[in-house]
Image (cartoon, helix red, strand yellow):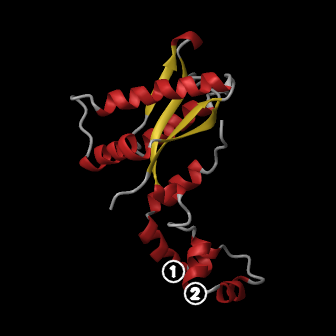
C-alpha cells in the first residue's frame, strides 16, 4: 500500500524565516545525497517512500526545532541536538545540516513522515477510533466519572488499535505533534 509522505524538518528557532527555509533546503539536499549514495544501503521500503515523496507528494513541513548547542556537558545542550539524538535512537532515517557560517552549528534536520503519523482522519487517535467502533454513548458512559486513562478502560481494544496503527507510529505521532510551525 502506497502511503502519502511528507518531508518534515526541524530548524533553529533563532534565525530569520528565510534562513530557516534555506537551512531546511540544505538538510533536504543532504537527505537527497544520502539516498543516492551507493555505499549506503537502504531498504526497498525506505527508497520507495523517498521516491514517492520526491516524485509525487513533495510536501514540506518546517517546524521550530529550538536551540543548537553540541556540548553535552553544558546544561544548555541544544533541543535541536536532542531531537537529532531521538531520531537516531529510534533508527529514523534523517539528514542534518551544520551551517559553516554559524560556527558549524546544527541548523536543520529533515526526515520523512508517512500519513499514519499526520493523517488522523484515516488513522484516528484511540478515542476517535473507539467512538467509531462502539459509539459515543458507550464511550461516554464508561468514562463518565472515571479517572483512569481511556486505554486502561478499554485495554483489549487499545491493544487492537495499537496493532492496527503500529506502536512506533503512536510514539512518533506524539513526538511530531509536540512541535509548532517555524
The local crowd at label 2, few if under 14, some if 14 to 19, many if 20 or more residues have their Cα within 10 Å, is few
Circle on res. 64:
none
Circle on res. 134:
2
- Count of labels in the image: 2
Label 1 belongs to which residue?
157
Residue at point 66% right, 35% down? Answer: 182
Asked if residue 58 lies left or right of residue 75, the reply is: left
One can see residue 4 in this view: yes
Q: Residue 108's spot in the image, x, y percent?
A: 53, 28
Residue at point 36% right, 31% down? Answer: 32
Near-viewer residue (182 or 179): 182
The local crowd at label 1, few if under 14, some if 14 to 19, many if 20 or more residues have their Cα within 10 Å, is some
Quarter assignment of residue 126: bottom right
Q: Residue 7's spot in the image, x, y percent?
A: 47, 41
Residue at point 62% right, 33% down? Answer: 79
Do tag 1 and tag 2 residues touch (Cβ < 8 Å)? yes
Amino acid at each position: 500500500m502506497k502511503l502519502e509522505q511528507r518531508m518534515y524538518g526541524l530548524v533553529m528557532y533563532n534565525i530569520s524565516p528565510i534562513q530557516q527555509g534555506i537551512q531546511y533546503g540544505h538538510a533536504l539536499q543532504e537527505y537527497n545525497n544520502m539516498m543516492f549514495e551507493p555505499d549506503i544501503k537502504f531498504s526497498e521500503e525506505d527508497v520507495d517512500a523517498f521516491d514517492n515523496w520526491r516524485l509525487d507528494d513533495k510536501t514540506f513541513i518546517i517546524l521550530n526545532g529550538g536551540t543548537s548547542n553540541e556540548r553535552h556537558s553544558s546544561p544548555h545542550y541544544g533541543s535541536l541536538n536532542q531531537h537529532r539524538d531521538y531520531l537516531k535512537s529510534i533508527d529514523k532515517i534523517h539528514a542534518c545540516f551544520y551551517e559553516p557560517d554559524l560556527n558549524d552549528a546544527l541548523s536543520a534536520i529533515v526526515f520523512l513522515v508517512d500519513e499514519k503519523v499526520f493523517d488522523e482522519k484515516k488513522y484516528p487517535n484511540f478515542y476517535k477510533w473507539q467512538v467509531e467502533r462502539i459509539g459515543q454513548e458507550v464511550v461516554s458512559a464508561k468514562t463518565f466519572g472515571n479517572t483512569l486513562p481511556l486505554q486502561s478502560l478499554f485495554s483489549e481494544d487499545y491493544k487492537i488499535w495499537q496493532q492496527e496503527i503500529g506502536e512506533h507510529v503512536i510514539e512518533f505521532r506524539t513526538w511530531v505533534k509536540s512541535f509548532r510551525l517555524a
